[in-house]
Every structure is written in structure tokens, then in C-alpha cells.
Amino acid sequence: MGVFKINIILNEEKYAVDLLNQVSLNKKVYNDLNLIARYLYHNQSLKDSEIYNELVNIMENKYANFIISKWQNSLLKISKDAKKKSLIVIDYIPITVNELDTINNIESKPIKRVAFTLLCLAKYKNIVNPNNNNWINYEFKDIFKASNVTATVKEQCNIINEMKHLELIKMNNLVNNLSLNICYIDKENSNTVLQINDFRNLGYEYLLYCGEKFIRCKRCNILVKKRGKTDKYCKECVLITEREKTNERVKKHRTLKCNAS
Ligand SMILES: [Zn+2]
């Protein structure tokens, strides 16, 4: 079993449609093109060559300084591989009263956030693979990043050991295996209190539930700390929307000039 980076999008279909409607692509271009290609194959029934043409078209329109010779091989491969994996469509991960009770009863604040993150990850894995049995397999540093907890390698190990000691998790005994079994997933199906539909900042999702102040970016929907009263966008999207506005102004200016001459 390999260790995967945490890059989970619950509703890949909606994400792909949103990408197609955006004026410019995001930072993770390769991942996003992959998703668009899978959407075009599985939902729009396009053939390999049609997907390739569409990807070139998207890059020409939504990616600054696109050079086809640099991208051709990647785009051909993405188009060809699109058929291998259909799109995952999950509306949300339900979090129940019992699960939140367990987490709220943990004393340490950072451990609460890590516990919430592990819970979401394991419940996601259980949905994607019904034989998963509450296991997850991610690098600790990625789990802590998703938990919005800053910790040294030693602190990370201490937190994981503490959780093991509290019997919240079990570990595989194999050396160098990062598999964790999450033991506090609700077996009684108590009421759902929270619906999680974004996996980018799971630690913040827990803090939001606890009443701390956050905003969801108007462009990409990521949950970020609220800094000012008029915050609308995350840091990345502030830059993107400013660039889009400038481009728009330049375009308008050019059209005016053309019409005048
Ligand atoms: Zn954003």
C-alpha cells in the first residue's frame, strides 16, 4: 500500500464544472486538467482526441504564457488516462453527535483538530471503498497540515502516541507503515450535526464548529481565517481576481481604442 498525498475533492463533478466556468486555472494545473479530462470522458462522452483538443483550448484561454510544445506530451497522457478513473461524487461527510462528543472530550486543542481530521479522512475512505474498515494511510506531515496544526516531527509522533494511548487510534505493527485505524467512528448512527464538504482545511472546519471566525473564499470556497471585516477571498484568489480585473481593463481599453480609430 502506497502513501498518498491528501488532495481530496468530494464532489469531483461539481469541481470540474466550476473549473470550466472559471476565467483562469488554479495553482494545481496538472491536477485540475486531470479532473477536467475525466469529466469530459465520463460525463460528456468525449473521445481521447476530442479531450486533448479541449484541454489545449482551455490552456490557451485560462493559463498565462501557455506553450504547447512544453505541454503536448502531458496533455496527451492526461487525455488518454481519463478513462481509467470515473469521477467521485460525494455531497458531504456526515459527522455525528457521538463523534463530536468523543472529540470535544479530548483535552488538548491540537489533538482535537487532528482527531477531527483523522475522522473525516477515514469516513471518506470508507465511502470510497466499502471494505476499508476505518483505515487511513497518509504521511503524518500531510495529516498535520490538513489539521492546521503546526508541529515538529517529534511533536507529531507524541500526538499520535497520545491518541494511541487514549485508544482513539490503533496502528499497524509493521515498521515504517503509517496506517492508522480510527476507532471513534460512530457505530450507532447518532444524529448528524455537521456536514463537511471541503477537505482543504479540516482543522479550521473544527474550529469553525467551535465558534471561531473564518470566511469561505468567494472564488474557490476554501475556509480561511477572517482577517478584516471586508474579507471575501483567500490569499491566492485575491491575486487571481486582481489579475483578472487588470486583464479585463486592458481588453476594454483596447476595444475602445479600436473603435475610435
Ligand atoms: Zn480562494
Image: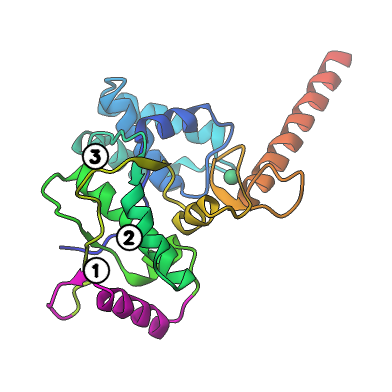
Q: Give the left or right position of residue 246, taking residue 167 as reference.
A: right
From the image, tell me which residue sits under label 3: 81
Report the Cα–Cα distance between label 3 and label 2: 30 Å
Say if the magenta span includes residue 162.
yes
How would you rate the neighbour count of disc 1 (Cα within 10 Å): few for under 14, some for 14-19, many for 20 or more?
many
Q: Position of residue 211 (x, y in %)?
A: 58, 52
The quarter holding residue 47 reads: top left
**Which is more N-terminal, label 2 or label 3?**
3
Q: Nearer the viewer, residue 14 or 192?
A: 192
From the image, tell me which residue sits under label 2: 118
Identify which amino acid the numbered label 2 is placed on: Leu
194 above or below 213?
above
Q: Position of residue 138 (x, y in %)?
A: 29, 64
From the image, tell me which residue sits under label 1: 169
Q: Position of residue 91 (x, y in %)?
A: 36, 33
The residue drawn where x is 15% and y is 81% is 175
The answer to whether any part of residue 117 appears in the image is no
SS for dot 2: helix
**Which is more N-terminal, label 1 or label 3?**
3
Q: Nearer the viewer, residue 103 or 76?
A: 103
Report the Cα–Cα distance between label 1 and label 2: 9 Å
Q: Position of residue 22 (x, y in %)?
A: 55, 31
The residue drawn where x is 57% and y is 36% is 24
104 above or below 7?
below
Q: Give the left or right position of residue 102, taking residue 58 as reference.
A: left
171 above or below 216?
below
Say if the magenta span includes residue 12.
no
Pair 1/2: label in front: 1
SS for dot 3: helix
Identify which amino acid the numbered label 3 is placed on: Asp
